[in-house]
Image: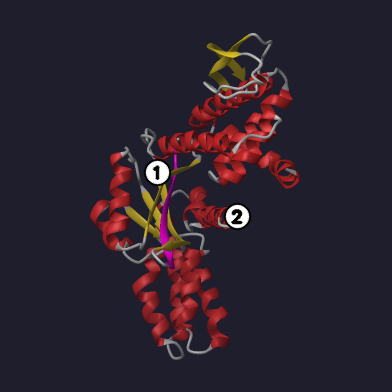
Amino acid sequence: MNSDQNYFNEKKSILEQLISNGSQNLTPLLEMLLNEAMKLEREVALKAAPYERSSERMGYANGFKEREYASRLGTLKIQIPQVRGLSFYPKCIEKGDRSERALKLAVAEMYVQGVSTRKVAAITEELCGFEISSTQVSRCARLLDEELQKFRERPLTSKYAYVYFDAEYEKIRHGHSVIDMATLIAIGVNEEGKREILGVSSALSEAEVHWRAFFEELQRRGLSGIQLLISDDHAGMRAARKAVFPSIKWQRCQFHMAQNAMSYAPKKSMQEEMAEAIRKIFQASDYETAQEQKKKCYEKYKETAPQFLKWVENSIEEGLTCFSFPEQHRKKIRTVNCLERLNKEIRRRTRVAGE
């Protein structure tokens, strides 16, 4: 418990911000966790599980009483367990900031960390104040997983002007081997200007069929209003994007393009300067200035790096689409850095889950 308590303390402000920003979507998770916590408290107070015969039983379960629980995240509809033969009231819904803060942190940790028996045990113990059995942990984890599945399949009711796509790989055991599994992720900027995770899809590769199925599933859930797609040049994505979103503009990630430029350097000593030449094109104040920087690049490398210039000619325009959009938006839509950060968090957490 000490390490988990330290984790709560260290991440408190980040998690509270996360749960507050996404409170509308996470309200069912808050209600579910609070209801489960109260059931577990009742079992401990009665010293017996439902329908269990025990000489240590202190009383009997007597149904539930509906109540609205007011919090700064909104009103939660909860079911307070009732008891016969014993004075009982759940501690996890006692009034005060401490209870609400513990609830917010517990749900945020579950949501961000992912469902794992060890973590659910630690978090539920933090919330309830007592140890729980593996069966109780599994029940809580199963219910949480069902709620998260609803979140993953929720209708997309907003319009998303900018949508970011990326793929990252996780090691999984398949048959008798450990292989890489492709995880496709989509983030959209909604009508309020906030980023929102739209969907996640996993398969054994990022071939066109996987990307196409992912795009079509997002459309089925209501994805609309797209003005620009932002991504790296993933294998299989080009064909799927053209098939599902044929008329939508595409911004290729400038960060990855600058890295790709280095692979065309005829000498290792030229790699960084060639990447810098590409960055100067992308950092131009407008499209016309970017074209001027492109000409300078041609003049500089026309004799020493013809393959690099061929790549520039074929690819550079894919990184300049952002100049068609408002200047104040360009810094945010020219790369997939927001998804790269999310991918790092996923890798950090899946490493923990695999231990």
Q: Which is more toward the observer, 280 or 123?
A: 123
Kind of residue at disc 2: Val
Tell me which residue sits at (62%, 20%) in the image. Answer: 42
Inspect this view and state whether residue 163 appears: yes
On screen, residue 303 above or below 40: below
Q: Position of residue 102 (x, y in %)?
A: 68, 31
3D distance between C-alphas at marks 1 and 2: 35 Å
Secondary structure mainly formed by the magenta segment: strand
Q: Any magenta on residue 332?
A: no
Inspect this view and state whether residue 247 appears: no
Kind of residue at disc 1: Ala
Secondary structure at badge 1 equals: loop
Magenta segment, which residues? 177-190
Q: Which is more toward the observer, 133 or 280?
A: 133
Secondary structure at badge 2 equals: helix
Q: Which is more toward the observer, 254 or 300?
A: 254
Q: Any magenta on residue 184?
A: yes
Q: Quadrant of residue 246?
A: bottom left
Q: Mark 1 vs mark 2: give the one in front.
A: 2
Tell me which residue sits at (68%, 35%) in the image. Answer: 131
Q: Position of residue 152 (x, y in %)?
A: 41, 40
Residue annotated with mark 2: 352
Mark closer to the chain start, 1 or 2: 1
Q: Position of residue 285 (x, y in %)?
A: 51, 60
Q: Position of residue 218 (x, y in %)?
A: 33, 44
Residue annotated with mark 1: 161
Q: Is the image coloured rainbow, by chain, by secondary structure, or in one colour?
A: secondary structure
On screen, residue 76 above or below 241: above
In the rendered view of the protein, which quadrant contains the N terminus? Answer: top right
Q: Which is more toward the observer, 342 or 233?
A: 342
